Image (cartoon, rainbow, N blue to C red):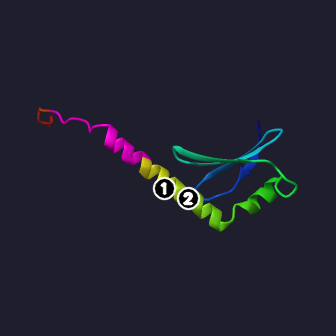
Amino acid sequence: MRILGYLDHPVLKITVFKTDTRLSIKFENGDFEQTYKFRPTEQSNSLPELNKLLDEEFMNKVLERFEEMKADFNQTFQRNLPPPEEDEFPGII
């Protein structure tokens, strides 16, 4: 796999990868990432053509999904990891 290039976005890091049989578009936002893999066609074989795929509607869905991922992770963290216990001793001044 090799990096074909990067696409500009104000919030996300977007990296395009290429293998012999597939293209991958990876979106990164902090600690979370989403990757979309597909077979290249004549219309989707270069960075400018791939950039056309990332229209406003699709990008809004990607950003919404990141928010859902963050919420899901925070919820499982709260359910499964107890909060730290407070010290029995008063704070040192």
> Pointer 1 and pointer 2: residues touching (CB < 8 Å)?
yes
The span picked out in magenta is 73-87
Q: Which of the 4 quarters of the picture holds residue 2?
A: top right
Residue type at tag 2: Leu
Residue matched to label 2: 63
Q: Nearer the viewer, residue 90 or 71?
A: 71
SS of the residue under disc 2: helix
x and y percent of residue 6 in the render? Answer: 72, 49
Residue type at tag 1: Glu
Task: State the quadrant of the C terminus.
Answer: top left
Task: Say whether residue 67 is left or right of residue 52.
Answer: left
Q: Which of the 4 quarters of the picture holds residue 77?
A: top left
Task: State the quadrant of the N terminus.
Answer: top right
Q: Nearer the viewer, residue 79 or 9?
A: 79
Residue found farthest to the right: 42
Q: Would you place residue 58 above or below residue 22 in this image?
A: below
Residue matched to label 1: 67
